């Protein structure tokens, strides 16, 4: 029986090659998109699954206690872990990871030149880190690897980078942080960390090595530690989370009193210092936007968007298959009539058509899997993933899912054509009086509307995604960020050496300006509490950046009032500059009232009674952080200010001559000049650099990836919709050929016939546009809510997409409308 059905299916495909190819093409496109999206979603949900205790591992999050208390924060103070160990025995283990930022690491072999690199993924961790997380040791014993001061664990890739093929355990690397070089002994080497891990480090340093951490163990407001807990088996996590809410008021009250001069209750007010236990399975895809994250993070919104797109594209290709199958129904009507006359039952015919549908899906799936494997390299490049079909090749469950998918999609997509074709009356068919009926026509038109509604909505959404990315890329930052190159690791040089390097570069015509800072836009995240000096002033949160006067000039900041720092004045050491937002936040009038100007006023720390820092200037607001966020209050301090703590980082920023930036050979020579100047001062400092404008762009890398992926899938969806429209226009031309023939006999021109033929389809597309527009508007409005600066949602975009959609539809049906209008009416009506 199967052989007979296969033979019939094969002959029918050969007889109707064009429609067979269109069916396979539509299904292949849809299934390819669905497979790629499925692989992407599975990859996003696979993060951290390799840890054996993953179901009992939780990260502790808390509010952003420095600013917006409604914002969840991924890191905490160092004392939280101590408090949990003391008061909460339900945790088997509690561990902390500290992120010091980039560090310079060097290795001096007994023979040969020293090797030095800047490491961006060096973390500080406690000894019990490996009791919670499963990372496989290549060399050494992980159980004791971080037990002593001066111990370090590195990955295999890092070991190869510094030591080549030599054994790494026992060797010493010098880690330079905050200008201080510390020797660390390699005690273990682990396998390279899987890509699907939210914890990504190259070097792990023993927390026992850092006295400044030991001295600040009591702190709760130094929120730079990521805290993880391993919950004992059988513990009710909801009850545990309720229990740990007593930790902050008990343990943090003394520090709040010391730092802010307030009781815990006064400081908290109506806010809530809530501790959240976030399961390890949710850390990657539901991670807070703020805090010291120690690896990549996903975005549940984009996962949901791509999942929805995958489902919609699968729906599109199913609809497309139905329309293409019914479009050629007239060609198979006589076959159905003859088979019914010869005794075939309706059930047998339905089985035949369902079998053909499943066969089409099976062939398309095989082709789609091949296309997917070919396409994955490009997709991985765009999405920054490492997707592969090979890992599922020998998985029985995966093979079972594919088989079930083929069967279900084949039945779902083929059910309507099967019942439709098998319902033909043999008498009417053989007399040539086949009628599609009103219900059949309505269903097919509805399916086309659904197809184009989805496609138009995707086009509008994709257009606005690109429009928003262009908008933020061209946003006025409030300062001149063009051609600024930032040289890292300046903290390894003394203040005098930094000044020497700055002078050396400025003397070169390739560089226009230069300045030193401890942080650089768009990564100025150093919040602290301050208040305006005087009675009845409140402590507020300000970001802070330490700069020299040349750096202010480099950014070309615009002064609303006051002046820049001046080295020639010996009194500027403790002077400060504010941005406009800081003036308002501190409680002074803005726009500035000359009678109550902040110039000459002082700011101080919350618990201080001294007028510590005099305001000498106010600059216009500028984006010192990502343009994803609104501009916050900023305090700019003098690089010589030794009263405020030093974060241990320094950058030398230089503005390149604009002609050099556009000349690749000249740019390469300039970079070599910087490196040579740096090595002349201190050969041990690794030369690392970045461009400021690229850092701003990197803040929207996820959105750029989403935009590129949406472009691809929108094009695929539109192609499928056009194939469906092509099929329906073929069906319509077949059904209306007698009507068009009669019209032509009665004097209708080709142009009039084409207009008559396309009018119905144009109406369907217009209905689709009307339905799609509010759906797309709802999506765009909600998506734009994630940005502080939004492109306007303008009507012309909807109108443009609508016109383009109608034009595409006309081009799609143009072939059939023209052929139908040009047919010889005598050939069409000869049997009447």
Image: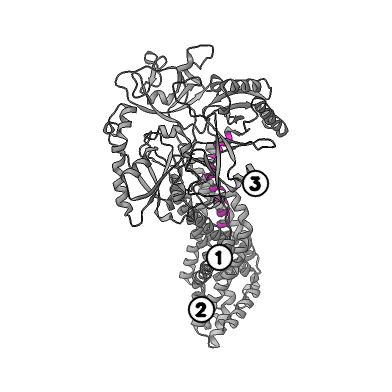
The residue under label 2 is: 350
Evaluate if marks 1 and 3 touch, with contact meaning CB atoms under 8 Å apart: no
Label 1: how many Cα within 10 Å (few below 14, some 14–19, many 20+): many
Along the line of sight, the residue nearer the viewer: 95 or 709: 95
Q: Which residues are magenta?
A: 693-717
- Mark 1 and mark 2 in contact (Cβ < 8 Å)? no
Q: Nearer the viewer, mark 3 or mark 2?
A: 3
Q: Residue furthest right?
A: 665
Q: Is residue 652 left or right of residue 583?
A: right
Label of residue 166 in the image:
3
Q: CA distance from mark 1 to mark 3?
A: 69 Å
Point 45% across, 57% down: residue: 52
Looking at the rendered structure, the secondary structure element under dot 1 is helix
Circle 2 residues within 10 Å: few <14, some 14–19, many ≥20: many
Label 3: few (<14), some (14–19) or many (≥20) C-alpha neighbours in 10 Å = few
Q: Nearer the viewer, residue 407 or 30?
A: 407
SS assignment for the magenta stretch, majority: helix
Question: Does the rendering let one see residue 329?
Answer: no
Which is more toward the observer, 285 or 209?
Answer: 209
Question: Residue beneath label 1, please?
Answer: 728
Q: How is the image coloured?
A: one colour
Q: Which mark is residue 494?
A: none
Q: Is residue 668 magenta?
A: no
Residue 741 sits in quarter: bottom right
């Amino acid at each position: 029986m199967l052989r007979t059905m296969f033979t019939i299916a094969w002959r029918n495909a050969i007889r109707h090659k064009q429609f067979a190819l269109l069916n396979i093409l539509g299904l292949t496109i849809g299934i390819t998109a669905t497979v790629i999206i499925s692989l992407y979603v599975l990859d996003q949900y696979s993060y951290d699954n390799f840890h054996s205790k993953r179901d009992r591992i939780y990260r502790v999050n808390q509010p952003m206690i420095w600013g917006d208390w409604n914002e969840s924060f991924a890191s905490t103070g160092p004392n939280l872990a101590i408090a949990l160990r003391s008061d909460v025995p339900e945790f088997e283990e509690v561990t902390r990871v500290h992120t010091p930022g980039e560090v310079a690491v060097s290795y001096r072999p007994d023979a040969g030149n020293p090797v030095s690199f800047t490491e961006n993924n060096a973390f500080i961790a406690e000894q019990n880190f490996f009791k919670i997380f499963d990372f496989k040791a290549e060399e050494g014993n992980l159980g004791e690897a971080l037990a002593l001061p001066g111990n370090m664990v590195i990955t295999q890739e890092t070991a190869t980078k510094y030591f080549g093929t030599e054994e790494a355990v026992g060797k010493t690397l010098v880690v330079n942080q905050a200008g201080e070089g510390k020797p660390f002994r390699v005690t273990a080497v682990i396998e390279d960390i899987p890509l699907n891990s939210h914890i990504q480090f190259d070097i792990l340093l023993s927390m026992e090595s850092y006295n400044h951490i030991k001295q600040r163990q009591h702190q709760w407001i130094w929120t730079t530690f990521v805290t993880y807990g391993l919950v004992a088996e059988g513990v009710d996590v909801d009850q545990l989370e309720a229990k740990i809410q007593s930790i902050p008021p008990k343990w943090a009250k003394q520090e709040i009193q010391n730092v802010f001069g307030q009781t815990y209750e006064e400081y908290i007010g109506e806010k809530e210092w809530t501790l959240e236990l976030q399961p390890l399975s949710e850390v990657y895809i539901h991670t807070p936007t703020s805090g010291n994250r120690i690896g990549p993070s996903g975005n549940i919104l984009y996962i949901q968007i791509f999942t929805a797109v995958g489902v919609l594209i699968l729906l599109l290709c199913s609809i497309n298959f139905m329309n293409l199958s019914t479009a050629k129904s007239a060609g198979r009507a006589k076959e159905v009539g003859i088979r019914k006359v010869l005794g075939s039952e309706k059930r047998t015919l339905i089985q035949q058509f369902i079998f053909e549908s499943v066969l089409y899906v099976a062939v398309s799936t095989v082709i789609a899997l091949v296309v997917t494997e070919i396409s994955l390299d490009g997709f991985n490049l765009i999405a920054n993933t490492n997707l592969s079909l090979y890992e599922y090749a020998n998985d029985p469950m995966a093979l079972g899912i594919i088989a079930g998918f083929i069967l279900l999609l084949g039945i779902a997509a083929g059910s309507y054509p099967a019942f439709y074709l098998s319902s033909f009356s043999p008498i009417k068919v053989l007399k040539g009086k086949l009628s599609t009926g009103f219900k059949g026509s309505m269903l097919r038109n509805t399916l086309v509307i659904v197809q184009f509604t989805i496609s138009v909505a995707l086009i509008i959404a994709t257009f606005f995604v690109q429009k928003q990315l262009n908008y933020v890329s061209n946003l006025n930052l409030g300062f001149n960020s063009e051609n600024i190159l930032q040289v890292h690791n300046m903290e390894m040089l003394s203040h005098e050496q930094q000044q020497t390097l700055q002078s050396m570069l400025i003397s070169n015509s390739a560089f226009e300006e230069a300045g030193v800072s401890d942080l650089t836009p768009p990564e100025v995240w150093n919040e602290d509490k301050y208040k305006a000096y005087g009675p009845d002033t409140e402590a507020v949160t300000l970001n802070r950046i330490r700069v020299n006067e040349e750096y202010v000039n480099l950014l070309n900041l615009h002064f609303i009032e006051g002046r820049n720092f001046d080295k020639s004045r010996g009194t500027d050491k403790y002077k400060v500059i504010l941005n406009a937002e800081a003036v308002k936040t501190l409680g002074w009038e803005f726009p500035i009232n000359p009678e109550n100007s902040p110039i000459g006023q002082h700011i101080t720390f919350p618990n201080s009674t001294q007028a510590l820092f005099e305001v000498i200037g106010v600059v216009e607001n500028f984006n010192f952080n990502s343009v994803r966020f609104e501009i916050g209050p900023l305090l700019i301090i003098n690089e010589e200010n030794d009263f405020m703590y030093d974060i241990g980082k320094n950058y030398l920023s230089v503005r390149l001559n604009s002609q050099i930036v556009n000349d690749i050979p000249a740019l390469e020579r300039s970079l070599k000049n910087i490196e040579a100047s740096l090595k002349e001062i201190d050969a041990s400092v690794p030369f690392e650099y970045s461009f400021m404008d690229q850092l701003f762009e990197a803040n929207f890398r996820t959105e750029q990836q989403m935009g590129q992926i949406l472009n691809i899938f929108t094009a695929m969806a539109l192609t499928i919709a056009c194939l469906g429209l092509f099929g329906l226009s073929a069906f319509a031309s077949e059904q209306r050929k007698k009507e068009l023939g009669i019209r032509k006999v009665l004097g209708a021109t080709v142009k009039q016939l084409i207009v008559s033929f396309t009018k119905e389809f144009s109406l369907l597309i217009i209905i689709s546009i009307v339905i799609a527009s509010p759906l797309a508007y709802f999506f765009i409005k909600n998506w734009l809510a994630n940005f502080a600066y939004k492109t306007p949602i303008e009507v012309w975009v909807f109108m443009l997409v609508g016109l383009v959609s109608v034009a595409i539809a006309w081009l799609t049906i143009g072939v059939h409308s023209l052929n139908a209008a040009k047919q010889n009416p005598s050939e069409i009506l000869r049997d009447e």
